[in-house]
Amino acid sequence: MGAGTGASCEDGRRRPAGEHVPGHRIADPNTLVTQDGPEPHDLIANEVTGDEKAVWWERAVAAYPPYGEYQAATTRVIPVFVARRADA
């Protein structure tokens, strides 16, 4: 299982600046570290497309409905990333 995340900008018209910052998920997908339990672990995040993106996008909008509003307000496609444990 992974954890999904999207990249959006409040006005919906432009790509978030952080998408292209060195060390960000697109620039270096091996930079994520999280802690879910007693020990932190490294994650690898990759952008998903097609059916996998549709599944994660539906989950994201169910968890936070404004994501759907962001997408409706823009012509750009909001990317979705899934982070999975590096040691899995």
Image (tube, rainbow, N blue to C red):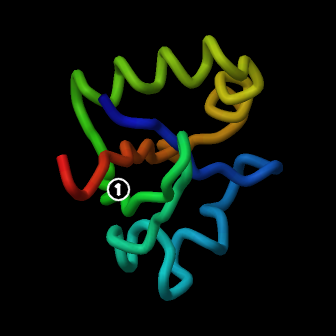
Residue 8 position, x and y percent, is 65, 49
Q: Secondary structure at mark 1?
A: strand
Residue lying furthest left: 88
Q: Residue at x 20, y 55 (%)?
A: 87
Q: Residue 36's quadrant in the figure?
A: top right
Residue 18 position, x and y percent, is 62, 72
Can you say which quadrant of the picture contains the N terminus? top left
Q: Amino acid at mark 1?
A: Ala
Residue 71 position, x and y percent, is 62, 32
Q: Residue at x 66, y 60 (%)?
A: 14
- Vertical arrangement, residue 55 with respect to residue 11, above or below: above
Q: Residue at x 31, y 46 (%)?
A: 84
Label 1 Cα crowd, 10 Å radius (few <14 / some 14-19 / many 20+): many
Q: Is residue 77 left or right of residue 11?
A: left
Q: Which residue occupies the foreground of this view, 56 or 13?
A: 56
Q: Which residue occupies the foreground of this view, 12 or 61?
A: 61
